[in-house]
Image (tube, helix red, strand yellow):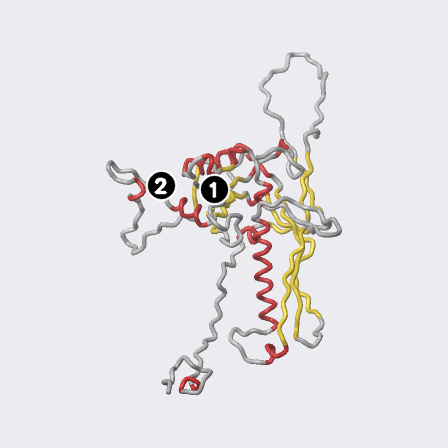
Amino acid sequence: MAFSNTYDTTNPGSGVSNREDLTDVLTILAPEETPVLSSASKQKASATFVEWTVDALSAPSTTGIREGADVSTFTDQFSGRARLGNYVQKFRRDYQVSDFQEAVDSVGPAKIAQAEAKSIRELKRDIEATLCGTQTRAAENGSDTAYALAGLGAWIDSGAADALVPAGFKTPADSIHAAAEGAFTETVLNNLITSIFRETGTSNNLTMIADTAVRRIISDFARTAGVSGTDADSVRTVNYNGDSAQIKLSVEFYQSDHGMISIVNGNPDCMPDTTNKDTAYLINPEYYGVHELIPMGSTRLPNQGGGERGYVDCALTLGVYHPQAHGKIEEVA
């Protein structure tokens, strides 16, 4: 006869009498932060296509004017204006809880209110991933294509002129770093910041939304030091407060010659490269925002006998008002 075992709760034996030890702790096993969505200014949209205009100043002139010279030519000061725009995209997450589940006691708990709250959290992650994406905009065609907004990766691009951004307003190549250009170093970061300064002319405070690989490299800036006969990566220089028992190895603010950079962790599930984790955006908060056509909300649907159900949704788009005021790191090499 087989010996009764504590793990066997289905067959006759001592195991059937054992109580479960199920705590009331419920852990969400996924990152939830949405720094791009949370830090964006919020605007109201009134159409499915949100537009804004951009203009540029002509190059400074140092040529003098002769005494008595008349004005014979005139400049159209508005000939260089361009109109940029982005489509509003609709986001939705549905939820349902059976009538039995609503009635029984559960850990969490797992009722209709919790299902609704979880859908809202998932919806925010959907929005964050779309805002951080590299996809371009798309218009509804009445059949198989829905409205889609262009993400930061498409706006911060130095490629050939396209329908999204005309040539004169493209992000400069010097504001973008890719692996083909070599390793990502502190010098590279300063060059990116300098390039952005040359476009805006002001030492604006930038926010870097960085994935994990980029963040770790920045934490080592100004701390690695080469020593004769020693691997440079094996030596670290740190500032240590003798009155404290802590050594800080993270970098939250980076002060450059052309502005202060706030380093923020991007959501690793929402950044474009979910494999290598080596993407970062240098965002100027003054020049981007989110336009909401339909604010985030929840709608309950009729219970048809199976249980409570509903959905949460919203419709919004990304506005990048000055594509030249931002930068990005595509790969760290």
* Cβ atoms under marks 2 and 1 closer than 8 Å: no
- Quarter assignment of residue 245: bottom left
Instruction: Tell which circle, 2 or 1, labels the residue nearer the N-terminal end.
Output: 2
Disc 1 crowd rating (10 Å Cα; few below 14, some 14-19, many 20+) is many
User: Residue visible at 47% across and 43% down?
Assistant: 261
Q: Closer to the camera, 132 or 61?
A: 132
Question: Which percent across, then down, holds residue 131?
Answer: 59, 49
User: Residue visible at 62% across and 51% down?
Assistant: 42
> Which type of secondary structure does the marked residue at label 2 adopt?
loop
Q: Quadrant of the N terminus?
A: bottom left
Q: Quadrant of the C terminus?
A: top left
User: Residue visible at 63% across and 67% down?
Assistant: 95
Q: What amino acid does circle 1 point to?
A: Glu
> Which type of secondary structure does the marked residue at label 1 adopt?
loop
Disc 2 crowd rating (10 Å Cα; few below 14, some 14-19, many 20+) is few
Question: Which percent across, then down, holds residue 230?
Answer: 25, 39
Kindly report the distance in space between the C-alpha atoms of the residues bearing marks 2 and 1: 20 Å
Mark 2 or mark 1: which is in front?
1
Q: Closer to the camera, 214 or 295?
A: 214
Question: Which percent across, then down, holds residue 80?
Answer: 68, 30
- Please give the residue where the numbered disc 1 appears in the rendered image: 331
- Please give the residue where the numbered disc 2 appears in the rendered image: 222
In the depicted structure, whether residue 316 falls above or below residue 160: below
- Quarter assignment of residue 15: bottom left
Residue most extreme to the left: 229
Q: What amino acid does circle 2 point to?
A: Ala
